[in-house]
Amino acid sequence: MFGWSRPFEPGVLPAQLFEVMRAADACEPIRGTGLWRPCLRFSTLDGLLFAHSAFPTTEQDAVFFGPDSYRFVRAIKKVALTARRVVDIGCGSGVGGIALAKRGVGAAPVLLADVNPEALRLARVNAELAGVRAETVQSDVLRGVQGEFDLVIANPPYLKDDARRVYRDGGGEYGEDLAVRITRETIERLRATPMGGHLLLYTGAAIVDGRDTFLHAVSSELAQPGVHYSYEELDPDVFADELQRPAYTHVERIAAVFLRAHVAPATGRSRARLLA
């Protein structure tokens, strides 16, 4: 039921469990069939359970968990960092922030931020299941995040989605806009703090005429004084079926990429301008 979103008869479950599921809106009736369908799906990562939206993820507020979730967590776990406060931007199910919190990264509760209230609801559930300290905030990138932080992680949507589903549509010409915003706003916020910090960003990059369109779009941000970064392709070709759509007519491939940036704090007049 919760692994493959299969319809089921109520009698296959203990009555008390079925009533709890109904009360939690974790299942709904399929009209005229006597069957019910799960409204949630559960996946495992590093021995932890993560609740997310049932398949197919057609709703505007669907909360996705898939291959990118595993690649994202593998990438951020390979980076040996300590932090006082971790912010997971566009947290979705909360998998990135929760995975780092389980490893003891971050002295304060991890902050799980998303524009989608349903994502925040499930992120709270998943943090509770994992036994980690977490706070949630509804935020468009960093606009709703208060206070200082020194580590930002993000796995934003990076496709062009005709249905404009929040978990899937990254905006911009090829879906890169949200990742560009995260990079720009994170660097800006970290430069304005006394200690600076790090950005770990997993996203997709459309390759057009041999050029990485995401890296090209953030090149001026990464060229600022005090910003040092590394960048790599984790998978050269993901979501190949998307290339058949008109929005990707000129795209050769979509690569899964990982950006790691260290941002030093601005000094003197530069920091004063940022704070102003």
Image (cartoon, rainbow, N blue to C red):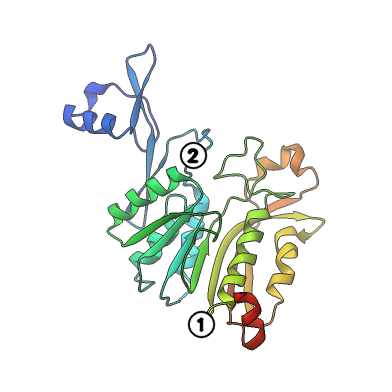
Q: Observer-nearest residue: 207 or 91? A: 91
Please identify the quadrant where the N terminus is shown: top left
| Residue bearing the label numbered 1 | 195
Q: Are marks 2 and 1 in contact (CB under 8 Å)?
A: no
Point out residue 209 in the picture as x, y percentages from the top left corner.
82, 56
In the image, residue 20 above or below residue 238? above
- The crowd level at tag 1 (other Cα within 10 Å; few <14, some 14-19, many 20+) is some
Rendered image: mark on residue 62: 2
Residue in the image at 43% along x and 58% along y: 112
In the image, residue 202 above or below residue 262? above
Please identify the quadrant where the C terminus is shown: bottom right
User: Which amino acid does the dot numbered 2 rest on?
Assistant: Ala
In the image, residue 58 above or below residue 229? above
User: Which amino acid does the dot numbered 1 rest on?
Assistant: Met
First in sequence: mark 2 vs mark 1: 2
Residue in the image at 58% along x and 68% along y: 186
Alpha carbon separation for disc pair 2 and 1: 36 Å
Residue at the front extreme? 276
- Answer whether residue 265 is visible to the viewer in this image: yes
Is residue 222 rendered to the left or right of residue 120?
right
Residue in the image at 38% along x and 28% along y: 6
Query: What secondary structure is marked by label 2?
Result: loop
